[in-house]
Image (cartoon, grey):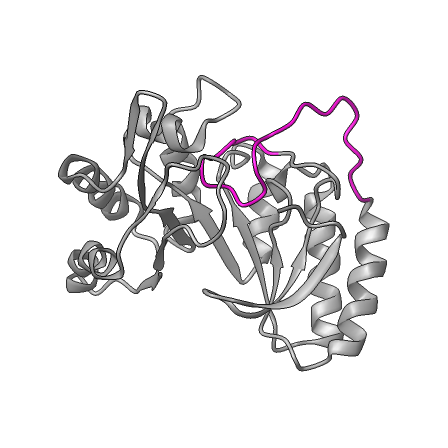
């Protein structure tokens, strides 16, 4: 499912409350540095000349929506048809968003859902530091599994690189992980095995995020063989972190 506009919603998010979405990617195609097997937007498609909204378009449309919503909003969420931090004017758009939020909906949080692949750009890091909620992905702490689940466009991307980038925030972010099982042709996909969880717990310890958000697939996925993890198992995954006093949100 693609979002066919720059601003969409408000919708009730499982994890964030009443959310007004902002899509900085094309409205007719997905554009992302990952090609995740579980992405609700489907698979990546070749795009020769992607049409991204301009900073001014985003500012005008967001301002128009916020001016009528007033206090009926919990969060402004950057997500949409791909990776929002790919937008070349991401920093300026976040600046504009914070200004508009302060004017029209001061109670709303500015949140970004990101796959963490653009954290090597200083402008992206600085933009994210302006936001209230930096929700950053790490679906596996094992390279082979990360590549099976997230299918990065950059074949040289490693978990070690993602970890290094995530550590720039000194724990001031929410770590987001989708747990799933399935099969892609002859390859087993499973980030819930004891070995996977041990590596993931160690990564959480190293990153020390202020919050961890784990969730299951909830909508149609491009790979049809994926299995939704039962709620009881998700809470079992969360428990060792909760025992350490870590704030864990489980969405099932």
Tell me where residue 131 appears, x and y as whole percent. 57, 58
Left or right: 236, with 96 as reference point: left
Would residue 33 be counted in the magenta stretch?
yes
**Res 31 quadrant in image:** top right
Would residue 188 be counted in the magenta stretch?
no
**Res 158 quadrant in image:** top left
Please name the residue shown 55% across and 35% down the image. 118
Please name the residue shown 48% across and 26% down the image. 152
* Main SS category, magenta section: loop
Residue placed most toward the observer, 6 or 168: 6
- Tell me the magenta residue range: 32-53
The residue at the far bottom in this view is 71
Left or right: 197, with 181 as reference point: left
**Res 96 quadrant in image:** bottom right
The residue at the far top in this view is 156
Tell me where residue 239 appears, x and y as whole percent. 18, 60
Tell me where residue 107 appears, x and y as whole percent. 61, 78
Left or right: 56, with 122 as reference point: right
Please name the residue shown 53% across and 23% down the image. 153
Q: Is residue 149 above or below residue 10?
A: above
The residue at the far front in this view is 224
């Amino acid at each position: 499912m693609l979002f066919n506009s720059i601003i969409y919603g408000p919708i009730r998010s499982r994890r964030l409350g009443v959310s007004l979405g902002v899509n900085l990617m094309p409205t007719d195609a997905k554009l992302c540095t990952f090609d995740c097997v579980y992405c609700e937007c489907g698979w990546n498609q070749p795009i020769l000349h992607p049409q991204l909204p301009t900073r001014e378009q985003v500012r005008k449309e967001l301002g128009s929506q916020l001016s009528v919503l007033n206090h009926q909003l919990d969060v402004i969420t950057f997500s949409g048809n791909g990776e929002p931090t790919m937008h070349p004017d991401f920093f300026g758009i976040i600046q504009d968003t914070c200004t508009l939020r302060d004017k029209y909906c001061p109670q709303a949080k500015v949140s970004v859902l990101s796959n963490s692949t653009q954290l090597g750009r200083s402008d992206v890091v600085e933009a994210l530091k302006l936001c209230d909620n930096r929700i950053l992905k790490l679906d596996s702490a094992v390279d082979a599994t990360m590549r099976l689940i997230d299918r990065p466009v950059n074949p040289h991307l490693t978990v070690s690189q993602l970890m290094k980038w995530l550590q720039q925030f000194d724990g001031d972010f929410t770590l987001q992980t989708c747990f799933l099982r399935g099969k892609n042709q002859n390859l087993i996909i499973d980030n819930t095995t004891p070995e996977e969880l041990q590596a993931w717990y160690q990564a959480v310890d190293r990153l020390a995020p202020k919050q961890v958000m784990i969730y299951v697939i909830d909508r149609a996925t491009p790979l049809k063989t994926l299995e939704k993890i039962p709620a009881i198992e998700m809470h079992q995954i969360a428990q060792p972190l909760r025992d350490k006093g870590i704030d864990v949100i489980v969405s099932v």
